[in-house]
């Protein structure tokens, strides 16, 4: 194979480097990076590991905030719209990464850049305007405190160009709330790892992009054939496409959908079973979530379209509307035992306006509710709020306080693990977090899901290998049951590898192997890369080389920058100790011994040390990462 | 409307707004037809979307040649939502209604 060959198309070709401290702006070629990593997140990861010294904190000026459009973004490859945002993870100092759709990444490429790397910190609020090969740092004091909606409207007025695309933070990011997101177009959130918090710390309110340029591919005719073929593959799975077009949440309108039984976490993890009448109330066709869904929208170049536009009329809360409502909203409110649909929709849209990561809010604040229930905090601490299970009003108000650092919000904004230390009284045990980041994920029933989340290199989240049955597994890797332990690790690794490829190419996971329909598969990626980027790769090259490069770069970053260990690859303590109390899976828990057996297999499949989970020189050199192995050795992290 | 009179064959591309998800692929493949590159600025089709209102605005200009050399207009071929069609007469249904 032509490993790390020369890129012959698909890229804009440049990386934009912006130093907010000095105001200096320069560019460099993106091609050598993409040849090594396939681009997108891979390139962001390579830049981070090369340029950030161990010991650097997320809030140091030397931390980098890297935006990277995938290498097929800007072409009509199905679902090629995604942008990765990588930085130091605010929750543990290791690798942080969040991924987002929309049209921003494509516009960035038409403006001439595959990546924007932000270093330093501005003295006063600024925004960055990037267009047609150049960039300008502009004053943004006038946007201070504005929600993402207001920011978008004001920037459109100011710039007077309908075609601009905006990545912005809301008040939460400005206030350095740890779980802050970067919002694309007000509705698509790069949520995890606190990327919005880092952006706020750098006093960067928004990045506006507008491009009038073009993207060329290596073999235009061959590429268009591959595109047409992959589009037909999607369309062939009509039933699945239709289900997605009714939005991801539509499947949950079927109250017998198995994920209701296997994937819910209730009252902050006191149980994993939610009664049917509550599901029915939330999803009621006349008055529930479906009744507020007006239409569905698609991201750039996406054939499946899964983004509902919600409209909530005036009721308990203000009138609200917007794109991007997702099934995590159901998980989120169930965590508070809230079955009121109006609260679910308000929760989601308000999080987008304030620039908060919904997973962080749900997992973090459900823990605060439990602290209240257990008497670790009381109404004096909450400014009079009664944090009672089922109360949507309490959730919405607490979330607002969090974003603006009001009262108890100030305590929670610095991170839930930190807050648990201050609250004390054993409260940390009840906080579900993975490597420091609060987690909404289920661990006790779906074992491959739990393994994928717990081993994610970016502090949890389920798009790094979590699986929920054969629909998420590779060829021949489906010999397991969702709820049992055997044979899960192999499927988790397959899923994690495909995520590496998708996030580097910028193809949405939902069009790829996460869709449950496998609209696209690694064989398709190889064809799109051959014709689009001009790299002569096979499916095997992708899975055994490039996917491993991506994952190993992030793993190595964690090893260099943190003390994360095997223990940190296990589910949160509570789920290992407490059994599910009701429902069909009563008595289930995350058995530590069996999870450890899955870990053994998982590490072996990646070629890591079975006992410690650490990388080896041999494994790294095999995939061309000798420089990374040297770096780890210098810091005493691996043996020579 | 006037622009239609400039056309010889009286065919045009029409969009059913209720089926359109605003993915912009029509704009992109149209630019490929004209330039061999992915170059939205050089497309006969322009798509604007407002995420706060959910409204997608779609416009096609007279540079559209219905992809005469392609067999089928690329925008119609690549629209996964079946929102676009080549129509013979603009009085037929669904020109561009929201």
Image (tube, coloured by chain):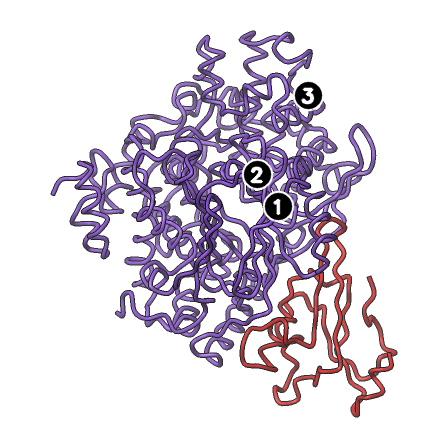
Chain colours: A purple, B red
Which x, y percent locates residue A589? 41, 25
Task: Check disc 3 and report its element: helix, strand or loop.
Answer: helix
Q: Quadrant of the N terminus of chain B?
A: bottom right
| Residue A483 appears in the figure | no
SS label for mark 2: loop
- Residue tagged 1: A139
Q: Chain of mark 1?
A: A
Mark 3: give few (<14), some (14-19) or many (20+) Cα within 10 Å.
some
- Residue that protrudes farthest toward the bottom in the picture: B8
Q: Which residue is pictured at 63% across the width and 41% down the height?
A: A252
The residue depicted at 26 percent of the width and 46 percent of the height is: A605
Label located before the other in sequence (1 or 2): 2
A98 above or below A300?
above
Question: Could you tell me how far apart the alpha carbons at marks 1 and 3 are, in whole angstroms?
Answer: 37 Å
Q: Are marks 1 and 3 on the same chain?
A: yes
Which residue is at 78% across, 91% downward? Answer: B9
CA distance separating discs 2 and 3: 34 Å
Which residue was labeled with disc 3? A394
Q: Position of residue A507 (x, y in %)?
A: 49, 58
Q: Earlier in the sequence, mark 1 or mark 3?
A: 1
Q: Is residue A474 visible?
A: yes
Q: Is residue A159 left or right of residue A485?
A: right
Q: Chain of mark 2?
A: A
Looking at marks 2 and 3 on the same chain, the residue that comes earlier in the sequence is marked by 2
Q: Which mark is residue A252?
A: none
- Quarter in which the C terminus of chain B is drawn: bottom right
Residue A365 quadrant: top right
Q: Give me the C-alpha separation between circle 1 and circle 2.
A: 8 Å
> Is mark 1 in CB contact (under 8 Å) with mark 2?
yes
The residue wearing badge 2 is A124
């Amino acid at each position: 194979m032509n490993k790390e060959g020369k890129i012959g198309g698909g890229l804009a070709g440049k990386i934009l480097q912006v130093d907010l401290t000095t105001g200096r702006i320069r560019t460099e070629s993106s091609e050598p990076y993409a040849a090594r990593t396939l681009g997108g997140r891979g390139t962001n990861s390579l830049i981070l590991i090369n340029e950030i010294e161990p010991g650097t904190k997320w809030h140091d000026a030397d931390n980098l905030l890297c935006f990277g459009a995938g290498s097929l973004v800007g072409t009509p490859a199905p679902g090629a719209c995604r942008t990765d945002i990588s930085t130091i993870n605010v929750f543990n100092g290791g690798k942080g990464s969040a991924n987002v759709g929309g049209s921003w990444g494509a516009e960035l490429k038409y403006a001439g850049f595959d990546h924007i790397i932000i270093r330093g910190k501005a003295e006063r609020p600024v925004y960055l305007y990037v267009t047609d090969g150049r960039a300008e740092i502009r004053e943004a004091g006038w946007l201070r405190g504005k929600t993402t909606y207001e920011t978008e409207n004001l920037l459109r007025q100011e710039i007077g160009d309908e075609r601009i695309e905006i990545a912005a933070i809301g008040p939460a990011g400005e206030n350095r709330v740890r779980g802050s997101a970067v919002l694309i177009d007000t509705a698509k959130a790069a949520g995890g790892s606190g990327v919005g918090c880092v952006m706020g710390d750098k006093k960067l309110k928004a990045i506006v992009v507008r491009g009038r340029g073009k993207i060329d591919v290596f073999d235009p005719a061959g590429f268009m054939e591959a595109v047409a073929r992959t589009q037909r593959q999607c369309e062939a799975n009509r039933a699945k496409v239709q289900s997605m077009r009714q939005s991801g949440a539509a499947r949950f309108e079927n109250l017998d959908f198995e994920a209701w039984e296997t994937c819910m976490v209730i009252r902050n993890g006191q149980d994993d079973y939610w009664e049917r009448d509550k599901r029915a109330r939330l999803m009621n066709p006349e008055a529930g979530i479906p009744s507020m869904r007006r239409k569905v929208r698609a991201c750039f170049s996406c054939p499946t379209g899964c983004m509902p536009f919600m409209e909530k009329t005036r009721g308990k809360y203000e009138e609200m509307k917007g794109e991007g409502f997702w099934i995590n909203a159901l998980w989120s409110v169930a965590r508070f035992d809230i079955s009121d649909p109006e609260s679910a929709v308000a929760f989601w849209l308000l999080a987008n306006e304030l620039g908060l990561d919904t997973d962080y809010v749900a997992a973090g604040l459900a823990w605060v509710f439990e602290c209240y229930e257990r008497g670790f905090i009381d109404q004096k601490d909450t400014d009079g709020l009664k944090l009672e299970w089922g109360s949507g009003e309490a959730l919405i108000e607490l979330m607002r306080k969090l974003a603006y650092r009001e009262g108890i919000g100030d305590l929670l904004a610095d991170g839930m693990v930190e807050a648990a230390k201050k609250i004390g009284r054993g409260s940390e045990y009840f906080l579900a977090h993975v490597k420091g980041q609060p987690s909404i994920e289920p661990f006790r029933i779906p074992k491959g899901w739990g393994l994928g989340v717990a081993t994610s290199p970016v502090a949890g989240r389920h798009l790094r290998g979590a699986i929920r049955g054969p629909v998420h597994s590779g060829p021949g890797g489906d010999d397991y049951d969702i709820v049992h332990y055997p044979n899960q690790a192999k499927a988790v690794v397959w899923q994690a590898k495909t995520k590496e490829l998708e996030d580097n190419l910028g193809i949405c996971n939902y069009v790829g192997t996460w869709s449950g329909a496998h609209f696209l598969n690694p064989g398709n990626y190889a064809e799109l890369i051959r014709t689009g980027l001009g790299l002569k790769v096979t499916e095997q090259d992708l899975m055994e080389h490039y996917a491993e490069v991506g994952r190993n770069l992030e793993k190595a970053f964690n090893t260099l920058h943190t003390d994360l260990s095997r223990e940190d690859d296990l589910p949160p303590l509570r789920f290992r100790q407490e059994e599910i109390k009701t429902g069909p899976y009563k008595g289930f828990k995350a058995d530590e011994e069996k999870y450890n057996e899955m870990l053994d297999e998982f590490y072996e499949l990646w070629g890591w040390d079975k006992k410690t989970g650490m990388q080896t020189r041999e494994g790294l050199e095999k995939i061309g990462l000798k420089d990374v192995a040297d770096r780890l050795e210098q810091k005493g992290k691996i043996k020579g | 409307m006037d622009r239609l009179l400039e056309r010889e064959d009286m065919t045009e591309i029409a969009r059913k707004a209720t089926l359109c998800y605003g993915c912009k692929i029509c704009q992109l493949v149209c630019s490929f037809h004209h330039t061999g590159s992915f170059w939205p600025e050089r497309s006969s089709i322009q798509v604007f979307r407002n995420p706060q209102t959910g409204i997608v605005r779609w416009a096609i200009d007279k540079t559209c040649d219905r992809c005469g050399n392609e067999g089928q207009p690329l925008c119609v071929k690549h629209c996964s939502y079946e929102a676009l069609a080549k129509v013979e007469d603009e009085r037929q249904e669904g020109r561009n209604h929201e």
